[in-house]
Amino acid sequence: MALVQSEGIVLKTHALGDTSRIVVAYTRDHGLVKLVAKGARRTPSRFGYSLEPLSRARFRFYHKPDRDLHLLSQAETLDPIGSRLGDLTRLAHAQAAIELIDRLVWGEEPHEELYDLLARTLGCAVEAPLAALPAVTIAFELQAASLLGYRPRLEACAGCGGPLSPRRLFSPARGGMLCDACGETGAGTIHLSADALAGLSLLVSRPLAEAGDYLEVRRAGEILRVVEAFMREHFQRFHGLRSLEVLRSLPDFEPSEDAPCPG
Ligand SMILES: [Zn+2]
């Protein structure tokens, strides 16, 4: 049993007995961990904001290999993100991000790039212009999927590597755009507008903080539907994400003029 230290972001907490708390945190060095904070409910001041969902904190804990729960020794708040959101829309986007990590990641395999992406996304939830938040959330979903090995293929056919069909066919099942021949055989393809394809490429590849520049609001609904279909196809645990309902209900996601039709 070793005393280890890592920066992490609190995804959720549960009560444990009358006085303690279990903290589920996504950490930079130990992946997803469950920490027992003894006495955290009896003397909450001992931990300050560090155990609140969305907080970024430095945790010191006794790491027991092969155990599901580790004993928290100390936690120091680095950024009380939840207390800085100040707005229900910002909160909804921040919750969408931590919920996605909670669903898609498990086990204590560290993934520093994914951790940093989550931290930047929460930073944007606090600071980016409100109008840019849907783009940030969609970019986060695409980039998280890419880091987990499911980067949508947009520059060549996802089926055979050939040149793309001028009809701009996206196949959620095959994980990207198709050529004409592959488009003939696959059901469930989505016709994309040129703007939506261009927006999608930028959202996958460019820094999150710029995402708002790439997503024309009138294409947001079209892009969101493609991203959702893609994520649902490749991540079973993407189904029924509570925060997506919130995202879908935002005024920016009015259906676009030419909605994609089934191929
Ligand atoms: Zn092909």
Image (tube, rainbow, N blue to C red):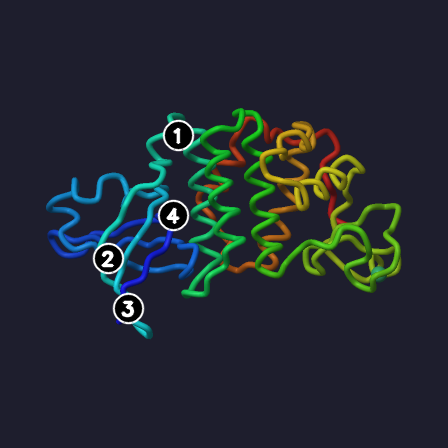
Disc 3 under 8 Å from ligand 1? The reply is no
Quadrant for the N terminus in the image: bottom left
Q: Tell me which image quadrant ligand 1 sits in.
A: bottom right
Of pointers 1 and 3, the one earlier in the residue sequence: 3
Q: Mark 2 and mark 4 in contact (Cβ < 8 Å)?
A: no
Q: Is residue 38 above or below residue 51?
A: below
Q: Mark 3 and mark 4 in contact (Cβ < 8 Å)?
A: no
Depth check, mark 1 against mark 2: the one in front is 2
Q: Distance between the residues labelled 4 and 3?
A: 21 Å
Q: Residues within 10 Å of mark 3 (few under 14, many from 20)?
A: few
Q: Residue 218 bears which disc, if any?
A: none
Quarter of the image for residue 200 reads top right
Q: Is mark 4 on a helix, strand or loop?
A: strand
Depth check, mark 4 against mark 1: the one in front is 4
Position of residue 36 in the picture relative to residue 27 (left or right): left
Q: Where does residue 86 sit, x and y in percent of width and height?
A: 37, 26
Q: Mark 3 points at which residue?
A: 2
Q: Which of 185 and 106 is in front in this view?
A: 106
- Identify the amino acid type marked 1: Leu
Q: Mark 1 points at which residue?
A: 85
- Identify the amino acid type marked 3: Ala
Disc 2 under 8 Å from ligand 1? The reply is no
Q: Distance between the residues labelled 4 and 2?
A: 14 Å
Q: Name the residue under label 2.
A: 72
Q: Distance between the residues labelled 1 and 3?
A: 35 Å
Q: Residue at x 55, y 39 (%)?
A: 137
Of pointers 4 and 3, the one earlier in the residue sequence: 3
Q: What element carries label 2?
A: strand
Q: Mark 4 points at which residue?
A: 9
